[in-house]
Image: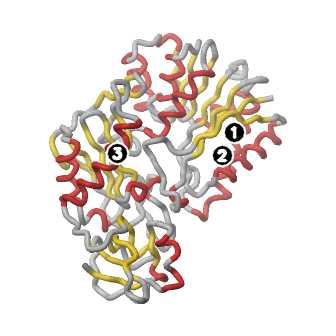
Amino acid sequence: MLKLTVLNKRVGPIRGRHPWVFSGALKNIPDGIKSGTPIELVDEQGNFLAAGYFNSYSQIAVRLWGFEADKEVDKNFFVARIQAAHELRKDLIENKKTDSYRLINSENDLLPGLIVDRYGDYLSVQFHNAGINFWKKEIVAALNKTMEPKGIYERSDVGNRAKEDNAVIPAEAGIPDQVGDDKKGILFGKIPDQVNILENGLKFIVDIAGGQKTGFFLDQRDKRAALQKYCDGKKVLNCFSYTGGFSVYALEAGAKKVVSVDASQSALNLVEENIKLNKLDNKKSELVAADVKQYLNGLENDPKLKGEKFDVIILDPPAFVKNRHKIHEGLQGYRKINEAAMKILPPNGILVTASCSQHVSLVDFRHMLSEAAGRAGRTVQVLETYTHGIDHPELAAFTEGEYLKCIFAIMR
């Protein structure tokens, strides 16, 4: 196994189990190393530090996947990693009411660059860089042995691939971080056009091949469940509804009306199908194909919409900040939609607001909410704060992997 030497002054993060090793931390990097090559890191005295794979000659040179010396990398290596991740999910999530969850959460499950989501009997996978893609054959074989799925589908097409010298973006943000071919397609078995999944006893249709991310927003499962206590007898507005996860939960909890707004008509069609699938009252559901910003502004200013009032508003937009150079611009986008929602909500109304922008911290997000509240003339009390779901564990050292924030607040 190829050994690379880490400068003694740079071994701290590795000993702290941070999964990235930057090129500047290495004494030298020989030419001609292929992405995916197994690497052992040693300090300047030759003492073993960690193991991983060679990533690239740009910022992140090595990604770590273990802290044991002389461990052979083959199908059995990946089987052990996948089994460990699966055992955690089996203990905490998998049951008769939930059959879908994130199985492999990249760096955080010691398989950097790999995302695997389970949708019932099917797996959706993303290989986020050339290094982990090098091991695709072994990973697919290990997934088959461990999970015995009916089909495995690759979704490495999600997001725009960004050069590492322009942005450092973890796989958790849903944006592949290494230049390469955007790939999608069946890796094993068969994948139906639509897969029915169970989440907390509710049924959802997932388009694995064509849906956003890997087909469904699994990372909002706990937030959808948390929403239900605020919905009984209430009128709910679900903005950026996608296929209606929050909408279905709200109706199941007794909401008197739910309006789902999304720019995609095909996504709204699935909202309708998901409501029918759960045998909920479609008469209590209204679907609006519109730009959310325009719709929210219309609720305040458009005479046709101005009389529409809501007790609960959900804002779950796509990432407004794609790289660290766009933080200010993105925060202004978040402020505008939150300000608009705050102006519409009545006293004691509930705002559920989220951000999946990895470059926006929870502190930044809270500050944005305070600015929006000031401009809207409202006092906002935070009731609940959520981050990653239980099937999206995070390494303590890997703060770069934090991306999801969701706040439940009451308007005063």
The kind of residue on which mark 3 rests is Leu
Query: Cα distance, mark 2 to mark 1?
Result: 6 Å
Q: Position of residue 401 (x, y in %)?
A: 50, 57
| Helix, strand or loop status at disc 2 | helix
Query: Which residue is found at the position 33% from the left and 24% from the top?
Result: 96
- Please count the marks in the image: 3
Query: Which residue is found at the position 20% from the left and 52% from the top?
Result: 142
Query: Which residue is found at the position 31% from the left and 27% from the top?
Result: 196
The kind of residue on which mark 1 rests is Asn
Residues under numbered marks 2 and 1 in contact, where contact means CB atoms less than 8 Å apart: yes
Give the residue at mark 1. Answer: 338
Q: Nearer the viewer, mark 3 or mark 2?
A: 3
Q: Would you say 184 lies left or right of 401 here?
A: left
Q: Eyeballing the image, is 169 above or below 296?
A: below
Residues under numbered marks 3 and 2 in contact, where contact means CB atoms less than 8 Å apart: no
Q: Would you say 261 lies left or right of 393 here?
A: right
Q: Eyeballing the image, is 290 above or below 80?
A: above
Q: Between disc 3 and disc 2, whose residue precedes?
A: 3
Q: Nearer the viewer, mark 3 or mark 1?
A: 3
Nearest to the observer: residue 83 or residue 297: 83
Give the residue at mark 2. Answer: 334
